[in-house]
Amino acid sequence: MNSIMIQGTSSGAGKSTLVTCICRILSNRGFKVAPFKSQNMSNFAYVENNFEISRAQAIQAIGARCEIIPELNPIMLKPLGNYLSSVYVNGKFFKKMHAKDYYTKFVNHDGIKIVKNSLSKLRKQYDFLIIEGAGSPAEINLKRFDIANMKIAEMTNSSVILVTDIDKGGSFASIVGTMNLLDIKHQKLVKGFIFNKFRGDIQVLKPGFSKIKKITKVPVLGTIPMLKIDLPEEDSLNVNAKQFKWTKHNLEKVDSEINRLSKIVEKSINLKSIERMIR
């Protein structure tokens, strides 16, 4: 099994949608592909067949045209407030845990074993795995407990593509800062940058691309324009996510939207470079 990993300079950079679109692009080319996110925090789940995973991975599975199974998101956290979360393992409720206990007693013990088991099962079933990171890989205060970013890239021998939301501003600084805060061995895993949610003339950005490549030795692989996206969103600080009913009509709408978005993304990124990373 070959894989790439999509990480972001922040939450909300567009990782989930990009994974969905790359899954659809590869599926259109006849490959057996699946998404994967080791750990996701969300109160919006796909609940079906007696298990729950984050709905983001369920939407990505629709993009990949693969079966929605617990292994796509082996650990899901549903925040309860006051640093408590309900922890779901392989789609089943495990226990309520305080953040401190989750980090110090779970992630690097049972958690990483659970993730490895899911990866092992997926490796036997699919040609390609498109892995999504969580938040930012440069949260240096949490690095020891991070089982969603660079530890997974190392484990799967995945090239990393770093995505940044340029609409928020500060993308160039975010990329350089992220790279500088990574360990050297993890810097070497990053093979390209993608600027997401861009408005305006791309020619204005190109001098910045040259500068950032000179600083980091890593190329920009594409710029995705600001898009109106009609897919169920994850809950986050800047999103008012809504409930979603998994009806046949809604799934057909999701599938059509994924087709539309993936065509735009395919034109916006250097797909040949990405294909070389995952072969």
Image (tube, rainbow, N blue to C red):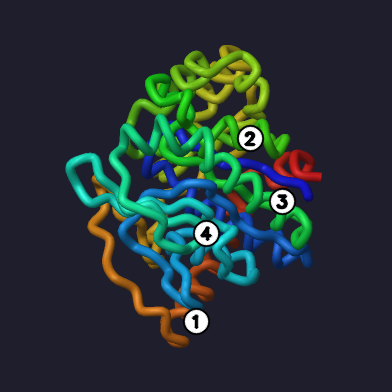
Residue most extreme to the right? 279
Asked whether disc 1 touches disc 3, contact meaning CB atoms under 8 Å apart, the reply is: no
Which quadrant would the C terminus be assigned to in this image? top right
At mark 4, the secondary structure is loop
The type of residue carrying mark 1 is Glu
- Say which of marks 3 and 2 sits in front: 3
At mark 3, the secondary structure is helix
Circle nearer the N terminus (4, 2): 4
Q: Camera-side residue: 182 or 164?
A: 182
Residue hosting label 4? 90
Residue hosting label 1? 252
Asked whether disc 4 touches disc 2, contact meaning CB atoms under 8 Å apart, the reply is: no
**Cα–Cα gap, marks 2 and 1:** 33 Å
Q: Is residue 264 visible?
A: no
Indicate left or right for 24 with 276 as reference: left
The type of residue carrying mark 4 is Asn
Residue hosting label 3? 120
Q: Camera-side residue: 22 or 156?
A: 156
Circle nearer the N terminus (3, 4): 4
Indicate left or right for 276 with 156 as reference: right
Q: Which quarter of the picture shows residue 52?
A: bottom left
**Cα–Cα gap, marks 4 and 1:** 27 Å
Q: Around disc 4, counting alpha carbons within 10 Å, would you say few (fewer than 14), some (14 to 19), or many (20 or more)?
A: many
The type of residue carrying mark 3 is Ser
Circle nearer the N terminus (2, 1): 2
Q: Camera-side residue: 44 or 50?
A: 50
Residue 168 on image: x %, y %:
32, 36
The type of residue carrying mark 2 is Ala
Residue at x 50% of width, y 14% of height:
180
Residue at x 38% of width, y 65% of height:
45
Residue hosting label 2? 153
**Cα–Cα gap, marks 1 and 3:** 31 Å
